[in-house]
Amino acid sequence: MSSLAPCFTVGSIVRCKTCFGDNISGEVVAFDLGVKMLIMKCPSSNGGGDEQTTCNVTIVNLSLCMDIEIVKEAIPPAEVQQPEPIDLPMIRERYRYATEHRTLSCRSYHPNASPFGQALFRLLVKRFGDPAIIWQNKGDQVAINILRQVVIDAPYATENIRYLDWNPKLAICVQEVVQNFCSKQF
């Protein structure tokens, strides 16, 4: 083989003979002239004939090939269809959502809180917003503090709600959220 390897188009059928005496033939999947590598899709060795559905992907180092033959050249399409433009606003929205979701998951974790309490914390953050809900340490227990006005102590039921400042609308809202959450869990 010459030092300058031929260029292969994707989809061409190629037959190679390696310096070890192996004959490899298959369809070109990728080719890199810089590193002299050819990736081919070869038929599986377990038979199957024309109805064969499985293939082996083989990487061939062209530096170790004695003979390379292009059996069938792939004909590129006359008109290449342009890919659809990337929807950047949608990607940004997905990224923002994923970041918020992961941040919420990280903030909802507390080593002294039960999984039930962590799930309630996530629900309250979705309801009241991220900065409004914080963990409040109480020795080996941890409580959920809502807007610095309401505290829910462990085990995080409606009986464990304490009000630091009386706000009737907030009290009713927190009670309903906790009650609905508890009823769905049990």
Image (tube, grey):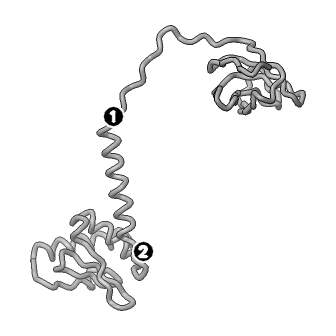
Who is closer to the viewer here, 58 or 150? 58
Which corner quadrant of the image does residue 122 belong to?
Answer: bottom left
Q: Which mark is residue 104?
A: none
Q: Amino acid at mark 2?
A: Pro
User: How many neighbours does mark 2 have within 10 angstroms: few (below 14), some (14-19), or many (20 or more)?
Assistant: few
With respect to residue 55, does 176 lie above or below?
A: below
SS state under label 1: loop
The type of residue carrying mark 1 is: Asp
Label 1 – label 2 distance at C-alpha: 37 Å
Residue farthest to the front, as pictured: 3
Residue 87 disc label: 1
Viewer-nearest residue: 170 or 136:
136
Tell whether 44 sits left or right of 131. right
Using the image, determine if residue 170 lies above or below residue 69.
below
Front-lying residue, 34 or 117: 34
From what the image shows, is residue 71 above or below residue 121? above
Q: Position of residue 86 (x, y in %)?
A: 36, 32
Question: In which quarter of the view is residue 8 placed?
Answer: top right
- Say whether marks 1 and 2 touch (CB < 8 Å): no
Which residue is situated farthest in the bottom direction here? 139
In which quadrant of the rendered image does the N terminus lie?
Answer: top right
